[in-house]
Image (cartoon, rainbow, N blue to C red):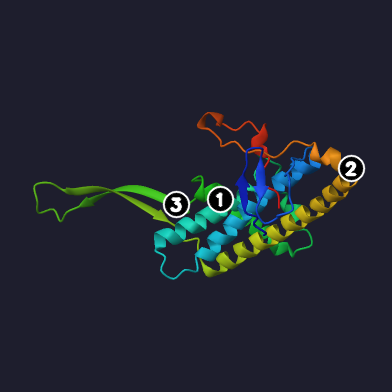
Amino acid sequence: MEFLPMSRTTSGVQIESIPDGVKVVQLGGPKAQRLADLGLHRADLQFAHDALEALNTSALSKFHREALWRSAIVHFFKCFSANEARFSLAPQSVYKGEPPEALENFTYFKDLRNKHLVHDENSYARSVAGAVLNDGTKQYKVEKIVVLSMFAETLEQNEYANFKLLIEKALGWVTKQIDLLCAVLTQELEAKPYSDLLAMPAITYTAPAGSELPYTGSGEQRNRNSR
């Protein structure tokens, strides 16, 4: 992924690494919207990938390893979940041509996310109440009421490798789609007179406010940085 340093100006934004750029114009239409959505997907997939990479740091505690693992899974499946903010990736398209194990692994981790990490719908997480009884030589019989919470271990080497492969395949698919759309949009823009391009509105950014929650899926906030 290419990161382009950006700064805000009085009229919009400026890409610092493109000195010849005089204006960053905002694109509209279905292709531009799909490209913006793909950009969000790529950011989430890259975050998931970086979270897995961070797991290789030897000094991490068990808590931090579990936090990175869960965060990677949640961000990955943001891209495949139905929402109003952006279109959802289809696993059948992303993993088309891959061995059947790819979709099997996808389903496994989707169930892990839906039925364990986000919701408790199976025995991966169990909690039972109990009472600790003494040996019967005291005036009372119950030493303590306890709650025992038990969680199955899901971060193993095999699971790590399979999930990382899913992320990398999805990242490759999204990046390819971005490149194809960028080529099409470039060709369309190059066919327009320069004066028309210069007259297009500049990209602007307004920091979100808490009052904007819940997100409605409309407005300028859907327009993100491009490549």
Q: Earlier in the sequence, mark 2 or mark 3?
A: 3
Can see residue 123? yes
Apparent side of residue 149 relative to residue 136 in the rendered image (left or right): right
| Residue labelled with disc 2 | 192
Residue 110 percent coordinates (x, y): 61, 52
Q: Which one is in front, 196 or 172?
A: 196
Question: From the viewer's perspective, is 46 left or right of 211?
Answer: right
Q: Which residue is mark 1?
A: 74
Pointer 3 or 1: first along the chain: 1
Q: Tell me the SS state at disc 1.
A: helix
Which of the pair 92/3 is nearer the observer? 3
Which residue does the numbered mark 3 point to in the structure image?
A: 125
Specify few, some or many for label 2: CA neighbours under 10 Å numbering under 14, 14-19, or 20 or more: few
Residue at figure coordinates x 62%, y 50% from the top left? 6
- Residue type, mark 2 in image: Lys
| Residue 30, x across and y down, in percent | 80, 39
Residue 205's disc number: none
Task: Give the label, 3 or 1, closer to the camera.
Answer: 1
Question: Could you say which quadrant of the image residue 135 lies in?
Answer: bottom left
